[in-house]
Image (cartoon, grey):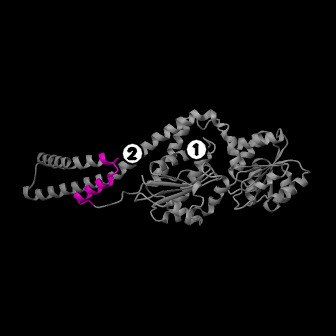
Amino acid sequence: MNFFVIGVNHKTAPVEVRERFAIPESQLPEAMQRLARYPGVEEAMIVSTCNRVEMVARSTNGSCDLHGFLREYYNLKPGEYEKYVFEHQKRDAVKHIFRVASSLDSMVVGEPQILGQVKESYAVARAVGTVQSQLDALMTRAFAVAKKVRSETAVASSSVSIASVAVELAEKIFGNLSGKAVYLVGAGKMCELAARHLMAHGAKKIYVGNRTYERALALAKKFDGEAIPFDQLYETADKADIIISSTGAPHAIFRKEHAEKFLARRKNKPMFFIDIAVPRDIDPALNELDGIFVYDIDDLQQVVQSHLGDRKREAERAEALVELEVDKFEARMLTADVVPTIVSLQEHLETIRQAEIDRVRGRLGELSPEQEIALEAMTRGIINKIMHTPITTLKQSARDPEATTVIDLVRRLFNLRTEQPPEEEHPVAAVSETKCGK
């Protein structure tokens, strides 16, 4: 259980810190490979979304300095951002991964997007070869636990979403959304979900701007809307009452001077900006202007939290289920550590048994069927008695901190070769959702 998780998320760090750690999708493969090459790390993957950037690793020797990796990768000074960084090890790391995949650690408990995002990261890690055996088994189990949580609890029912909260805030600002125009900047899933909620509550016109014009056209078609070339963003943004932005740009694309021009052209009619990107697309300074209302992902979180009381009981049931699954996984992994030695011992003693039977047959001559059966039974009985104590000891030591010592002792006593068990094949799980800023 030499698993480790380190990173920042919406619980430990504000959005201005999370955007410092965000890793663009295009850079994830290289980042995972760098993490996998870091001293002490055997397997690795990275989850980078709007609300979290988390490094997951497995170490063979039980320790690895992931804080050092963060300092190296982000070029941080010692202690810089340290108060925002969390770390989990071994059992706690397994529990954290199960909770993340099950959406129990999400800003919106029960939302389905995080599972798709984790599956995306897993697929990338497998594609670049940074996930092979134990971490592969951990992630595969995490997906199964997530499915179990959704099927056996109601934690995902009647879920409050970022999209629904955006609608609630927009209605408070405008009174109602009848006839309002919405501008989607970026063509990702979160933008689309928010737009669907706004349209369902009366918004009339949809504009879509994206760096890839074909994607803007495809999304605009879903809403019978209008796609706009990205280079016309600032000339057309004032057409909208509500702007939802999630581009994945490394810096703000809407600044105070832009908003001043929008207001002038709109004759000071209010505009509502929903910034669901990390790094943020909208400079917080826009809030200084009368008539401009900006909500970023952390602002939306605060509203979400006020709605979550109704699902507290279901969340507690889900947490208990996850705790039980962590126990099962831990037991399975501990047993897995001794299985290769048990198999090696059985094969080793069986080889000796067969060799001795072949040697004795040369002296005894041809045996009758009854004698062959008796010889087999006798030799197998001897081998089983020899194996009983070491195998029982190995199984009993599986949960013991000294398990490695016992395994090594048995291998030395019986002169067993040290071999790695064959790697299991796990199909790459289907990806169901896209990242926030895609």
Residue at 63 percent of width and 43 percent of height: 108
Q: Identify the residue position indicated by label 2 in the image.
A: 331
Position of residue 310 in the picture relative to residue 259 (left or right):
left
Q: Residues within 10 Å of mark 1 (few under 14, many from 20)?
A: many
* Precedes in sequence: disc 1 or disc 2: 1
Which image quarter holds the C terminus? bottom right
67 in relation to 102, above or below: below
Q: Magenta region: which residues?
A: 395-416
How far apart, in angstroms, are the residues tagged by discs 1 and 2? 24 Å
Give the residue type at disc 1. Ser
Q: Quadrant of residue 106?
A: top right
Q: Position of residue 28 (x, y in %)?
A: 59, 61
Q: Position of residue 383 (x, y in %)?
A: 19, 50
Q: Identify the residue position indicated by label 1 in the image.
A: 103
Q: Secondary structure at mark 1?
A: loop
The reply to whether residue 64 is in sight is: yes
Q: Position of residue 199 (x, y in %)?
A: 78, 42
